[in-house]
């Protein structure tokens, strides 16, 4: 028997790798001598760099680099390097702080993300994978572009200040000063966010409140972002505000997709491609995937388990999903092929207990699912 184990993490309790280990133990108990292929996953958020590290193998390594943090503090952030490829997680430099203070969003910026990209270029990378999500900035990626060499001046010809004030005072940009190595790069943005830059579904209105953008600040933030878009679009002579995904990571998507002409991919699909998923599915009997909570959005937004199941369907391999919990509309998962869905909880319990026992519960649920699968195999033999 050959089992492909490709779960996402159970946020707050188990990493994707730890979930793999729990399922593997169940596989070996029910099917001694079976082959288990461990492919821990991610969809652009937490755990994606670890998934890429395992997918790229021993030739990849994390390299810590010094950058400027969200509020200008000096921090160290990891870049995943593999030959001419590098993966950069924007949240490592501009991550949303655990407790977001009101008005801190006015001084937060994406400068450190640009520094991470520069470090990757210095190390020889020309294929860049940049994950968006979980950031605390709302500057449209302006300061990321400044870190990459773009000249951004105010009405008096002085460099614009940090934070939102930089967007408000922006008068002229010169993209010819961008790092010349970017012209030779292929940049892939991993994001499942489709929001435009501006408007009721834009970066400010939807995501700024999570970052300290109080109701009284939102008009100022939106006006600054619109002014920034006006200046940038005049400079590059193309629209950036309406691009799907432009509103990701506080508008960083607009800078990457619209200014640097990056390619946008589903985070889950990109990770599955990097791990050469279909090759591992060859001759597989069953796929296991997992996530903390499954609902309709898990399917419609293409979260990792859904994308793994859809690709397995095309290869004719059945899929079992183990989840911490699921809603009634999670039955949409069954439209993705021959699938089964199991909750790991073995009875009513506080969330704290489920988190504490997560490894045990995953193994137990996987074992029960495998016993059912084995019973089905015996039934076919008797037909």
Image (tube, rainbow, N blue to C red):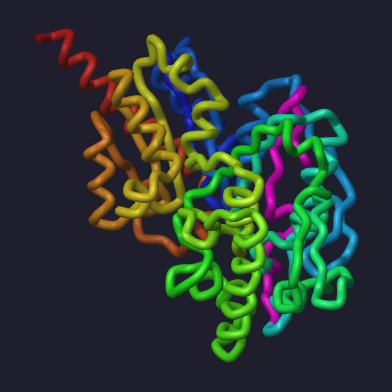
Q: Is residue 15 left or right of residue 303?
A: right
**Residue 190 is inside the magenta segment:** no
Task: State the extent of the magenta-drawn residues as a range.
Answer: 78-101
Q: Is residue 104 left or right of residue 259?
A: right
Give the residue furthest to the left.
383
* Relative height, residue 259 to residue 379 (above, below): below
Q: Residue at x 81, y 74 (%)?
A: 154
Quadrant for residue 52, please give it: top right
* Relative height, residue 189 to residue 126 (above, below): below
Q: Is residue 83 visible?
A: yes
**Residue 94 is inside the magenta segment:** yes
Q: Is residue 275 left or right of residue 111?
A: left
Quadrant in which the C terminus is drawn: top left
Residue 135, position in %: x, y? 65, 61
- Out of 167 and 253, give the one closest to the viewer: 167
* Relative height, residue 144 to residue 274 (above, below): below
Q: Residue at x 52, y 20 (%)?
A: 276
Quadrant in which the N terminus is drawn: top left
Residue 142, position in %: x, y? 72, 62
Q: Is residue 263 left or right of residue 315?
A: right
Residue 198, position in %: x, y? 51, 69
* Relative height, residue 37 to residue 206 (above, below): above
Q: Residue at x 68, y 47 (%)?
A: 89
Q: Residue at x 77, y 44 (%)?
A: 117
Residue 294, position in %: x, y? 37, 51
Q: Is residue 93 visible?
A: no
- Out of 276 and 126, give the one closest to the viewer: 126
Quadrant for residue 65, please give it: top right
């Amino acid at each position: 028997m050959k089992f492909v184990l490709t779960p996402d993490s159970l946020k707050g309790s188990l990493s994707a790798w730890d979930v793999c280990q729990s399922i593997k133990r169940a596989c070996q108990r029910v099917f001694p001598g079976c082959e288990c292929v461990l492919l821990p996953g991610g969809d652009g958020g937490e755990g994606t760099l670890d998934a890429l590290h395992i997918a790229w193998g021993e030739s990849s390594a994390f390299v810590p680099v010094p950058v400027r943090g969200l509020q200008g503090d000096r921090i160290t952030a990891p870049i995943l390097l593999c030959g001419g490829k590098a993966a950069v997680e924007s949240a490592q430099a501009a991550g949303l702080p655990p407790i977001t203070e009101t008005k801190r969003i006015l001084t937060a910026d994406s400068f450190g993300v640009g520094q991470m990209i520069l470090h990757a270029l210095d190390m020889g990378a020309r294929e860049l994978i940049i994950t968006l999500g979980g950031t605390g900035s709302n500057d449209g990626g302006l300061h990321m572009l400044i870190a990459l060499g773009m000249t951004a001046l105010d009405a008096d010809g002085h460099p614009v200040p940090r934070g939102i004030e930089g967007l408000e005072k922006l008068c002229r940009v010169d993209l010819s000063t961008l790092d010349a190595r970017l012209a030779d790069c292929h940049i892939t943005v991993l994001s499942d966010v489709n929001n435009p830059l501006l408007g009721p579904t834009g970066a400010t209105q939807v995501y700024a409140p999570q970052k300290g953008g109080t109701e009284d600040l939102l008009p100022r933030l939106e006006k600054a972002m619109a002014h920034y878009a006006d200046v940038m679009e005049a400079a590059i002579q193309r629209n950036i505000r309406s691009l799907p995904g432009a509103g990701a990571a506080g508008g960083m998507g607009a800078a990457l997709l619209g200014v640097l002409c990056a390619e946008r991919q589903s985070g889950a699909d990109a990770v599955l491609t990097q791990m050469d998923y279909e090759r591992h599915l060859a001759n597989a009997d069953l796929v296991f995937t997992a996530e903390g909570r499954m609902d309709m959005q898990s399917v419609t937004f293409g979260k990792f388990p859904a994308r793994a199941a859809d690709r397995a369907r095309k290869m004719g391999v059945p899929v079992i999903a183990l989840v911490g919990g699921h809603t009634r509309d999670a039955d949409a998962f069954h439209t993705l092929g021959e699938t089964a869905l199991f909750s790991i909880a073995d009875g009513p319990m506080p969330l704290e207990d489920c988190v504490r026992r997560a490894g045990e519960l995953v193994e137990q649920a996987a074992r029960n699912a495998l016993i059912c699968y084995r019973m089905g195999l015996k039934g076919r033999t008797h037909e």
